[in-house]
């Protein structure tokens, strides 16, 4: 279980990105975090694995207070939190296999990783994951040769090979076309279900959020303004999150869930 | 940008009148300085020698042909020395420059004091020409190839480290962040997140500097630091102009080959 208590982040510029966020996410729940740009979505998930240091409050994963960890313990804790990025953030000049195996860096010593001598089990798992996402033949290609959707699949493999308890997903579809976006979201969803993973997914696309998550949290100006089911996103709620706009085309009619299949 | 509102119209001009005047003034001052300096140089020049220059040049040029081809057999060893000075000097420089660059880059330096030291190394290496380094090292180490190699090395550290650290500062931080998020250690972050991004630059800078060093090492012999410059200065001093032209041709061919090699290698890396 992931528990955020009074999580607060003030940047050096003085901007208050998070204002005392309280959130509890039970194991195995896929949660979509929506909100306008600058609402603090990225800051929130980065405060969990401390790519951004929270100013105040705490984040607790399975009874371990992440905000209090020493740098060594933090590295250990990060191994249990897989992260998927908006622009994929693959190391462009490394091969697909090296990128996937980089998810094991927290478990492997420096020289073994430097000479690419990863344990056999890790390599086997990497092949299995690449096969799962349909990229087995691409293992030896350089990451910059792949298309956007393929890169994001590699990013997913890199996060999963960590064998995480929690997935932090930052705008996974922002650089992808609508069809690929749906495929990627479906893949993340399936993998979370297969492995019983907890996930926080930052996403701009309200419709995708509704389709692929069990719970939606709306963030505006660093505060939670909505926390509830995907069906509960009414025009009034969206106005509260994003501001005044005509929302009639955005909200999904719950019964056409399978329209895109 | 100047936006001027009048009663019935909005006018846009690139600059305000004040700014435009200031720019004209700056041009005026600059041109006056150039003209003034020109007049001083002109006063102190013996124009007779200058008028004579084309005749002198033609005279020396005439004495240079035909090149003394038999002299080439004596140039093989000096050319080999020159290439070795350049190559070894570049290797030494790169071995030192890469760690210095990592210490000098804002995003990889272990500490701001270390950064200052690294920047100082870069500036001091760059501020002294390799000929001057060679001049001093000939005094310290005695004449020969060693002094030349170290001179080339010292001069190249700053050049290489500066270009490399600038490219380290321009890397895509997202890739490093992603590696960090897996629980990687600092060293792993360096080798997985940063090194792959800057490796092409490191190789490119090394090759580029080697190419420059081939040319620089041809003159080090002038101060006794080994290489073909030794023969060049001896030949000029003894007015052996046919030998001078042979040497210049040999240097031309060497530089031509080094340009070709570096272009090929650079093409292969990128």
Image (spheres, coloured by chain):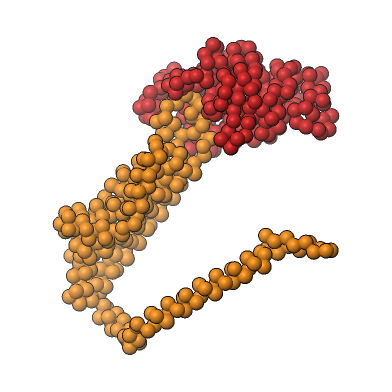
Chain colours: A red, B orange
Q: Residue furthest toward the left?
A: B142
Q: A181 or B222: which is nearer to us?
A: B222
Q: A55 or A161: which is nearer to us?
A: A55
The quadrant in which residue A165 appears is top right
Q: Where does the image place residue B171, in percent across and percent down from the top left? A: 49, 41
Q: Is residue B65 above or below residue A103?
A: below
Q: A95 or A197: which is nearer to us?
A: A197
The quadrant in which residue A19 appears is top right
Q: Is residue A213 something that shows in the picture? A: yes
The structure residue drawn at horizontal position 58% and vertical position 33%, both measured from the top left corner, is A11
Q: B107 or A185: which is nearer to us?
A: B107
Q: Where does the image place residue B11, in percent across and percent down from the top left? A: 76, 63
Q: Is residue B251 above or below residue B119?
A: below
Q: Is residue A129 left or right of residue B116?
A: right
The quadrant in which residue A160 appears is top right
Quadrant location, the N terminus of chain B: bottom right
The structure residue drawn at horizontal position 40% and vertical position 27%, both measured from the top left corner, is A113
Q: Is residue B160 above or below residue B259?
A: above
The structure residue drawn at horizontal position 24% and vertical position 58%, both measured from the top left corner, is B134
Q: Is residue A128 something that shows in the picture? A: no
Q: Count all numbered tags in the image, as a single digit.
A: 0
Q: Is residue A186 left or right of residue B179?
A: right
Q: Is residue B118 above or below residue A55?
A: below
Q: Where does the image place residue A1, in percent across and percent down from the top left? A: 59, 12
The structure residue drawn at horizontal position 59% and vertical position 15%, both measured from the top left corner, is A2
Q: Is residue A128 left or right of residue B77?
A: right
Q: Where does the image place residue B195, in percent across and percent down from the top left? A: 42, 38
């Amino acid at each position: 279980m992931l528990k955020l208590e009074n999580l607060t982040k003030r940047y050096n510029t003085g901007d208050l990105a998070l204002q005392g966020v309280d959130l509890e996410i039970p194991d195995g729940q896929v949660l979509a975090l929506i909100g306008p740009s600058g609402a603090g979505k990225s800051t929130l998930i980065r405060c969990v694995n401390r790519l951004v240091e929270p100013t105040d409050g705490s984040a607790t994963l399975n009874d371990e207070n992440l905000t209090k960890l020493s740098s060594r313990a933090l590295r250990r804790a990060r191994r249990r939190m897989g992260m998927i990025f908006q622009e994929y953030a693959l190391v462009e000049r490394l091969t697909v296999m090296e990128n996937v195996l980089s998810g094991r860096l927290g478990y492997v010593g420096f020289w073994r990783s430097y000479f690419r001598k990863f344990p056999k089990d890790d390599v086997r798992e990497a092949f299995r994951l690449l096969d799962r996402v349909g990229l087995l033949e691409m293992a030896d290609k350089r990451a910059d040769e792949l298309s956007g959707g393929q890169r994001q699949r590699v990013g997913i493999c890199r996060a999963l090979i960590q064998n995480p308890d929690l997935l932090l997903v930052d705008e996974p579809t922002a650089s992808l076309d609508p069809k690929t976006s749906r495929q990627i979201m479906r893949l993340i969803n399936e993998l979370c279900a297969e492995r019983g993973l907890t996930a926080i997914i930052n996403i701009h696309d309200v419709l995708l959020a509704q389709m692929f998550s069990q719970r939606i949290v709306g963030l505006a100006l660093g505060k939670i303004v909505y926390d509830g089911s995907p069906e509960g996103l009414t025009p009034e709620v969206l106005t509260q999150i994003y501001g005044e706009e005509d929302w009639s085309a955005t909200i999904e009619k719950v019964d056409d869930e399978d329209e895109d299949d | 940008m100047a936006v001027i509102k009048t009663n019935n119209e909005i006018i846009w001009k690139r600059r305000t009148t004040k700014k435009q005047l200031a720019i004209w003034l700056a041009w005026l001052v600059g041109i006056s300085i150039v003209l003034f300096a020109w007049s001083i140089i002109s006063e102190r020049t013996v124009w007779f020698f200058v008028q004579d220059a084309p005749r002198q040049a033609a005279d020396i040029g005439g004495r240079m042909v035909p090149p003394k081809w038999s002299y080439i057999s004596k140039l093989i060893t000096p050319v080999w020395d020159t290439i070795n000075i350049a190559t070894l000097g570049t290797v030494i420089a790169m071995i030192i420059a890469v760690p210095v660059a990592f210490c000098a880059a804002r995003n990889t330096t272990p500490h701001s004091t270390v950064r200052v030291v690294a920047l100082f190394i870069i500036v001091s290496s760059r501020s002294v020409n390799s000929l001057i380094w060679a001049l001093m090292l000939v005094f310290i180490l005695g004449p020969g190839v060693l002094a030349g190699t170290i001179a080339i090395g010292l001069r190249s550290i700053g050049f290489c480290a500066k270009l490399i650290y600038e490219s380290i500062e321009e890397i895509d931080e997202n890739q490093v962040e992603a590696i960090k998020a897996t629980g990687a250690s600092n060293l792993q972050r360096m080798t997985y997140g940063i090194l792959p991004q800057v490796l092409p630059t490191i190789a490119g800078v090394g090759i580029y500097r080697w190419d420059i060093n081939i040319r620089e090492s041809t003159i080090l012999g002038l101060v006794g630091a080994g290489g073909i410059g030794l023969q060049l200065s001896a030949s000029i001093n003894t007015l052996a102009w046919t030998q001078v032209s042979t040497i210049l041709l040999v240097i031309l061919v060497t530089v031509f080959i080094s340009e070709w090699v570096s272009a090929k290698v650079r093409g292969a890396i990128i």
